[in-house]
């Protein structure tokens, strides 16, 4: 199954106005977790008010202690500062990696912009070494753009 084929489902979930934003974001996490075999933890982090930190939003996967991440710390914290996608083919090779689980081998983080401001990100961990491609990046950019429409 191609990632592109999930786009209509993502759009449908995010435009369900009878559900809260958190319910819709959780449903997107569940969809990606179920449909993409190498997505083993899928979640959103959002800027925590006016603090220079991220706060964990809806997610699917193993529980995490990382509910607050300072800007600059770990992959997520670095993306909050750089405003750029960060693909980590091998987390063991990253000095600034915050381990959530010993099973995680790779991570991808894509920032979420509203009116040009980085307000959050989607974070995906994989137990598969080096699984993420340019297709994953484009797809997750699409997901973030769709979420941004709901936040704008």
Image (cartoon, grey):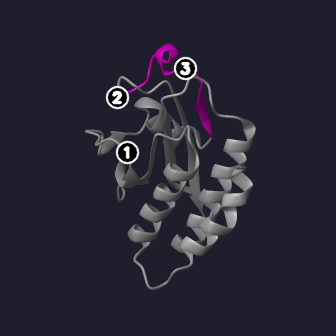
Nearer the N terminus, badge 2 or badge 1? Answer: 1
Is residue 141 highlighted in magenta?
no
Q: Main secondary structure of the magenta part?
A: loop
**Separation (CA) of disc 3 from disc 2:** 14 Å
Which residue is labeled 3 in the image? 90
Nearer the N terminus, badge 3 or badge 1? Answer: 1
- Indicate the secondary structure of the residue bearing disc 1: loop
Label 2 crowd (10 A; few <14 / some 14-19 / many >=20) = few
Label 3 crowd (10 A; few <14 / some 14-19 / many >=20) = some
Magenta segment: 85-99
Label 1 crowd (10 A; few <14 / some 14-19 / many >=20) = some
Residue 74 coordinates in the image, percent (x, y): 42, 30
Based on the displayed image, in which of its 4 quarters is residue 100 positioned? top left
Which residue is labeled 2 in the image? 101
- State left or right for residue 100 relative to residue 9: left
Nearer to us: label 3 or label 1: 1
Which residue is labeled 1 in the image? 61
- Indicate the secondary structure of the residue bearing disc 2: loop
**Separation (CA) of disc 3 from disc 1:** 19 Å
């Amino acid at each position: 199954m191609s990632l592109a084929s999930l786009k209509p489902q993502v759009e449908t979930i995010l435009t369900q106005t009878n559900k809260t934003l958190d319910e819709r974001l959780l449903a997107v996490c569940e969809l990606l977790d179920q449909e993409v075999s190498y997505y083993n933890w899928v979640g959103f982090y959002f800027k925590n008010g006016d603090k220079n930190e991220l706060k964990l939003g809806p997610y699917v996967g193993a529980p995490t202690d990382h509910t607050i991440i300072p800007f600059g710390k770990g992959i997520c914290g670095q993306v909050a500062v750089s405003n750029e996608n960060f693909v980590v083919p091998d987390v063991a090779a990253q000095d600034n990696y915050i381990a959530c689980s010993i099973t995680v081998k790779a991570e991808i983080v894509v920032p979420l912009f509203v009116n040009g401001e980085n307000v959050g990100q989607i974070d995906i961990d994989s137990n598969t070494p080096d699984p993420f491609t340019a297709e994953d990046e484009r797809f997750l950019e699409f997901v973030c753009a769709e979420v941004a429409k709901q936040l704008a």
